[in-house]
Image (spheres, rainbow, N blue to C red):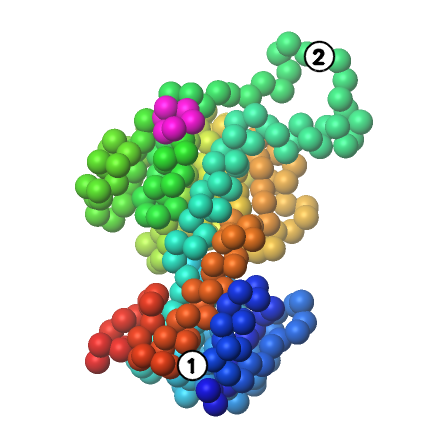
Amino acid sequence: MEKKILVTRRYPETGIRLLEQENFHLTFWEKEKPMTQDELIKQAKTHDALLCTLTDKIDSHFFNECSHLDIISQFAVGYDNIDIASATRLGIPIGFTPDAMSEATADIAFGLMIAVARKMFFLHKTIINGQWGYFNPTGNLGIELKHKTLGIFGLGRIGIKMAQRCKNAYEMNILYHNRTPSKTAEKLLDATYVEFEDLLSQSDVLSVHCALTPETKDIFNQRAFKRMKPSALFINTARGPIHHEKDLICAIRVGDIWGAGLDVTNPEPMQPDNPLLFMENVCVLPHVGSGTQEARNQMSVLAAMNIIEFYKKGHLPHIVNPEVLES
């Protein structure tokens, strides 16, 4: 095809080969550091479509400058970096890659839960710092997870897989809070829908799997942490701004909660002197939820197929704003 596609990063070859087989003209951003928005706009102005990811700022200013684009395909399941309202107003379909990373992200959430409960990151550092001393029967004690209560905030694809892992491994009781109850999930997991306040007060582990929206931004703040059990673990593998980071630091310091496992922070990247990195009951990863070969390859395929199907058949297999095509 004669269409020109701007590819903002070096995505896995599984998807790139599919685009090349369709004879699209591909332009790659070869640098490791992402484009600035000015660079992105300059490049996008001479292309028909965009294959992008979360680090690309695609806001109203971008759309004012690049309203000509046929399609934007996002290499991610989330799309809070994109002004969907502006895209929809301009009739630009936005593709994304749902479910490709569900298993990988659930593994990270599950792993962080165990790591926090047993202080794994902190204890690893004691070895590096030459502090592995004599056996201490009462030192560095963690907590066990069997028969504890898991609270899921956002029981979607990833939340369900996290709940399945916890139920199968530790026979955990499952509570959840969504905008609307999910009878299918309740039957699958024997899960119980509760109000947000009850989720806070009853969960031994509270794992966040919701989208970042104006309603969820900073919802886990000082007030929320004070409602949780002092023995509770807070896990966030969704988006950093869902928790208020200064409030989280304070909550752990004063003992409002036991600790936290984070794959997302606010801002990203986290500064190396952030107090969370030095806390005994905290484990932080650099936003690697989708970081498996299998997940990234599948994400690349789905992102590519959104572009291919749009130009060949006029639809996207995975679209955020389907109304632009329905009209």
The residue tagged 1 is: 63
Q: Residue furthest top?
A: 137
The picture places residue 29, in percent across and down from the top left corner, at: 62, 75
169 up-or-down from 181: above or below? above
Main secondary-structure element of the magenta-colored stretch: helix
Classify mark 2: residues with Cα within 10 Å, few (<14), some (14-19) or many (20+): few
Return the mark for residue 135: 2
Indicate the secondary structure of the residue bearing disc 1.
helix
Q: Are marks 2 and 1 in contact (CB under 8 Å)?
A: no
**Can residue 17 be seen from the camera position used here?**
yes
The picture places residue 287, in percent across and down from the top left corner, at: 55, 51
Q: Quadrant of residue 163?
A: top left
The picture places residue 231, in percent across and down from the top left corner, at: 45, 24
Q: Quadrant of residue 170?
A: top left
Dot 2 amino acid type: Phe
Indicate the secondary structure of the residue bearing disc 2.
loop
Q: 303 or 286: which is nearer to us?
A: 303
Q: 156 or 275: which is nearer to us?
A: 156
Q: Is residue 292 left or right of residue 94?
A: right
The mark that comes first in sequence, 2 or 1, is 1
**Residue located at (25% from left, 40% from top):** 185
**Residue located at (24% from left, 74% from top):** 323
Span highlighted in magenta in the image: 167-172
Q: Quadrant of residue 229?
A: top left
**Label 2, label 1: how many angstroms apart (C-alpha)?**
61 Å
Q: Is residue 170 magenta?
A: yes
169 up-or-down from 298: above or below? above
Q: Residue furthest left?
A: 183
**Can residue 228 be seen from the camera position used here?**
no
Q: Is residue 269 left or right of residue 129?
A: left
**Residue located at (26% from left, 36% from top):** 188
